Amino acid sequence: MINQIPPGMILMLGALLVPFLPRRPAQIWMLLLPVLGLSHLWMLPDNLLMATELGGYELDIVRVDRLSRIWGTIFHIAAFLSVVYALHVDDWVQHLSGLVYAGSAIGAAFAGDLITLFFYWEITAISSVFLIWASRNEAAYKVGLRYLIIQVASGVLLLAGTLLYYRDTGSITFEHMGLTGPGPIIILLAFGIKAAFPLLHNWLQDAYPNATVTGTVFLSAFTTKLAIYALARGFAGTEILIYIGAAMTVFPIFFAVIENDLRRVLAYSLNNQLGFMVVGIGIGTELSVNGTAAHAFAHILYKALLFMAMGAVLHRVGTIKASELGGLYKTMPWTAGFCIVGSMSISAFPLLSGFVTKSMIMTAAAEGHYTWTFIALLFASAGVMDHSGIKIPFFSFFAHDSGKRPKEAPLNMLIAMGVTAALCILIGVFPGPLYALLPYEVDYNAYDATHIVTQLQLLLFAALAFGVMMRTGIYPPEVRSVNLDFDWTYRKALPWLVVQVRRIGGHIWGEQKELALWTVRGALGIAEREYGPRGPFGEPWLTGRTAIWTALTLVAFLLLNFYMS
């Protein structure tokens, strides 16, 4: 009987009770749901396939294997930590949408066919937008609409690609596809939107900083990592992903360095880390895919920890602008400490989670002789140290004394941050249990002397560069500003162009309306005279007359074509 419950469904259905329970029982119930869901997941046997038929399609609504199990495991852990972090919130909309969002992401990770995947794909979009709208302000409403349009568009592309794939192959099984036709290409684009590929990425920096304090923690865990899972399942070894991923690791660094909103800095940093995972998928070896899965697992934790820390600052101070913060370590020491653990983890310090996961992808790039990609990953690693390893904790807690003396974060926030920080350390010190979950057998040692020395050198020089730039005034100052990214083209330039076209078109129409109407009436009159019942072209023609006019028309066309060419 337990094998008949799809993973994720416990969270989705259990969430429906939350609005009807008193606050304390609701809190206990929300904490219990991810625990029950994870226990259920680990009771399911490997290679389980749960199939049904719908509308003539054979649907594999559940497929359990090592790749889906590791994503299901970390999604349940992230859901539990996010619930703990949000316990102080008295808003059933956020709790309900967060649990449904997490459950649908889990369900998608176990979908064995593309139609089931589409079903969960769209639920993640619809449920997660309420985490943005729950901010309940005009800006969040507009951001939520943009987010919803983009996420639903990703689902529409997924469905269109699925139909084309079915037409060409007769199958809707969600398995390795590669770029074998128009269907997989469109599906890759759908995955790329959720994975925030370059030029498709701005929804992330738009949406995450405008969500609620707790909603951003939920958002950081599921949408993009679900896309990484989908890419690993369907497009491992697709070489173009190597170069897309390399670009993803590099370009966000420059935006993150000049960004004043620290949650937007983390959003750009999220882009950067996704790039490492996309590179690993593109390389497609067992080591690189293992590295992608391990890095996604670790990234969900340390990125959630950083968003938790910045959320706690926003909750207590009311702003997350670097130019308005500083000196907060004096009254928020625990939050500052947990933030430092997250920053060191994302920077891949030895004995922390990022060190034992990111290195697998970089080693796979080196072994595959992707020299320029490896150099790009090295540069991106140094950039991460700069904008997430140093900038986030430095400008939040230490840079200068802003004079603000807020209270420490609420107890539930501290517990969530503490547990997450402990997991980051445990994975870094004892990577074996994580490696045991990976899709393929692991023959890799992160703690060899070469890797330790190389990484420490990289971190040291990145810190030195930051210090020199700060002392010499080269580092971009933290000032109130708006940074222009690619979204300027469709948020500002395109609406301006539409307005101008309508204005010019309206002016021309106003000036030439009478002439245009007179011309149309004249043309209709000529057509009536010539082609009407009494006109010369309106009566039936003899065969010879028809042939002559056809020949003349052909000659005219040939002459026109000759002179035009």
Image (cartoon, rainbow, N blue to C red):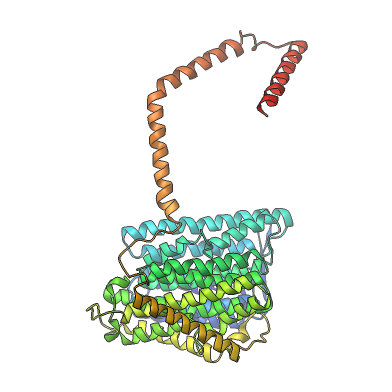
Viewed as shown, does residue 4 lie left or right of 212?
A: right
Instruction: Give residue 509's position: percent from left, percent from top.
Output: 41, 28
The percent coordinates of residue 249 (x first, y second) are 53, 70
Examine the rendering and report whether any part of residue 320 can be seen: no
Q: In the image, what residue occupies the spot 58% across and 64% down?
A: 244
Q: Residue at x 39, y 45 (%)?
A: 496
Residue positioned 64% across, 57% down in the render: 185
Q: Is residue 258 above or below residue 386?
A: above
Q: How many marks?
A: 0
Front-most of 313 and 366? Answer: 366
Q: 429 or 150: which is nearer to us?
A: 429
Image position, residue 258 (x, y; %): 38, 67
Nearer-the-camera pick, 394 or 48: 394
Residue 384: image location, x then y, percent: 47, 76
Q: Quadrant of the C terminus?
A: top right
User: Horizontally, is 447 left or right of 410 in the view?
Assistant: right
Instruction: In the displayed orientation, state which residue is furthest to the front.
Output: 472
**As displayed, is residue 487 above or below residue 416?**
above
Q: Is residue 437 above or below residue 237?
A: below
In this view, which residue lies farthest toward the left?
403
Can I make out residue 199 in this image?
Answer: yes
Q: Nearer the viewer, residue 254 or 423?
A: 254
Tell me which corner region of the image, top left, top right, bottom left or bottom right, holds residue 310.
bottom left
Q: Quadrant of residue 294?
A: bottom right
Name the residue rendered at 56%, 55% in the picture: 156
The N terminus sits in image quarter:
bottom right
Please give left or right for residue 565 compared with residue 340 in the image. Answer: right
Answer left or right for 441 relative to 86: right
